[in-house]
Amino acid sequence: MLGKMVSVEQALSKLDHGQSFLIGGFLNVGTPEMLVSGILEKELKDLEIIGNDSGFPDRGVGELIANKRVRKVVATHIGTNPETGKQMHSGETEVVLVPQGTLAEQIRAGGAGLGGVLTATGIGTVVEKDKQVIEVDGKKFLLEKPITADVALIKAYKADKYGNLVYRKAARNFNPIMATAGKLVIAEAEEIVEAIDPDEVMTPGVFVDMVVRGEE
Amino acid sequence: MDKKQRREIIVKRIAKEFKDGDVVNLGIGMPTMVANYIPEEIDIVLQSENGFVGLGSAPMEGDEDKDLTNAGGQPVTIRKGGAFFDSATSFTIIRGGHVDATVLGALEVDEKGNLANWMIPGKMVPGMGGAMDLVSGAKKVILAMEHVSKDGSPKILKKCSLPLTAAEEVDLIVTDMAVIKVTEKGLLLKEIAFNTTVEEVQKNTQAKLIIDEDLKTFGE
């Protein structure tokens, strides 16, 4: 087996304008910053990015927005990046705000091949708009549809050549769920080892297409 | 009283609401301060929606860990017995009813227990983050809020005017003037601050208050 290790250049060569990206991280903790910088340098544009938040204007995913590479943002929170709000109000960028638990479950559903999830979150609020309300045993739920993307960019702490991943502390967040829901899944790891103990694997390598070495 | 003193009265009172062993999620800002006033004999487990339980205090300067922050991005620590997990598990805890109480701020709340705290159309649209999930999923929703807005207008209304975070989910409202329980009959005034009167509280509240027969004072 040749393994899933590739160079950053090889990984970036698979990416294109207009693609949708699931990008792991929570306020830049657990964001694959090297891959995101690669997208910026490659001058990819017209992108859709899906993630917890839109980061900060000068770091991580926020930089893609500040540099106007993004056509659509799906996030739970954009307050830390004023540029996102500005582009939303001017109509330059489409912004879809989603409750955090709903986003996690939509991506999980996408990765798991489910038709969506039913949740009470958002009932009686603007989140309900244009969505199907389904009653189960007298309780109202919203049908939230699955989310997948062309590419998932994942940040791991440790990876092996089989693509198995281990995350560290609160840097796990959306990464393991997103690793299941990209057509192409690229993981950036701080450390590469020969083989991770199967009992310790957090994301099985079957979900992961490529592994690149990131910075520590 | 200045803003700091008003906030202290609020968070000190909320800190008395928990039982030993409760799983609690504290929102960013004033709610975070509640952790500093939990009675010594009570041990609560703090949940952080970015993916762990056992949220501890801020680290000493120089001991910050790039992979360990709270949901607001500030460096924190994790306590013995804590655990990390992914966002789906984090919201399984929140939406599955495994959080005993959440404390959140409010822009507006009304007599039905409707809460608005995530956006002001045309002005401030930061996004709801995990607030909608917390308010609809936690067993008990406690609001930590100043009784009136900066211009003195009531924030406890007959009906919220701003977009809602969740409908009819608030259980308890704690302000610098009052402790109010949301009941099916309306807002029940349980306690008033030591430095105010029932009349003052009602004057600063748009919704009609039902006065508890066993009205107490707090904040001395």
Image (cartoon, rainbow, N blue to C red):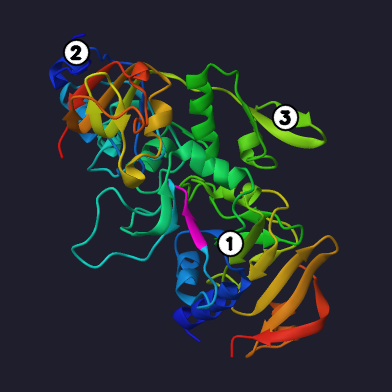
Res. B90 in view: yes
Residue marked by disc 2? A13
Nearer to us of marks 2 and 1 is: 1
The answer to whether dots 2 and 3 both sit on one chain is yes
Callout 1 crowding tier (Cα within 10 Å): few <14, some 14–19, many ≥20: some
Q: Magenta span has B151?
A: no
Q: Amino acid at mark 3?
A: Val
Residue marked by disc 1? B22
Disc nearer the start of the sequence (2/3): 2
CA distance separating discs 2 and 3: 42 Å
In the rendered image, the residue lying farthest to the top is A1
**Foreground of the two, A214 or B20:** B20
For residue A133, the mark is: 3
Relative to B117, A37 lies left or right: left
State the image coordinates of residue A26 (x, y, percent, origin top left).
36, 42
Name which residue lies at 71% across and 71% down.
Answer: B180
Relative to A18, B107 lies left or right: right
Task: Name the chain letter of the residue that bears numbered label 3.
Answer: A
When asked about the image quadrant of residue B70, the answer is bottom left
**Foreground of the two, B23 or B159:** B23
- Whether B88 is drawn above or below B132: the answer is above
The stretch of residues the image draws in magenta is: B45-50
Nearer to us of marks 1 and 3 is: 1
Q: Secondary structure at mark 3?
A: strand
Name which residue lies at 52% across and 65% down.
Answer: B44
CA distance separating discs 2 and 1: 50 Å
Q: Amino acid at mark 1?
A: Asp
Task: Name the chain letter of the residue that bears numbered label 2.
Answer: A
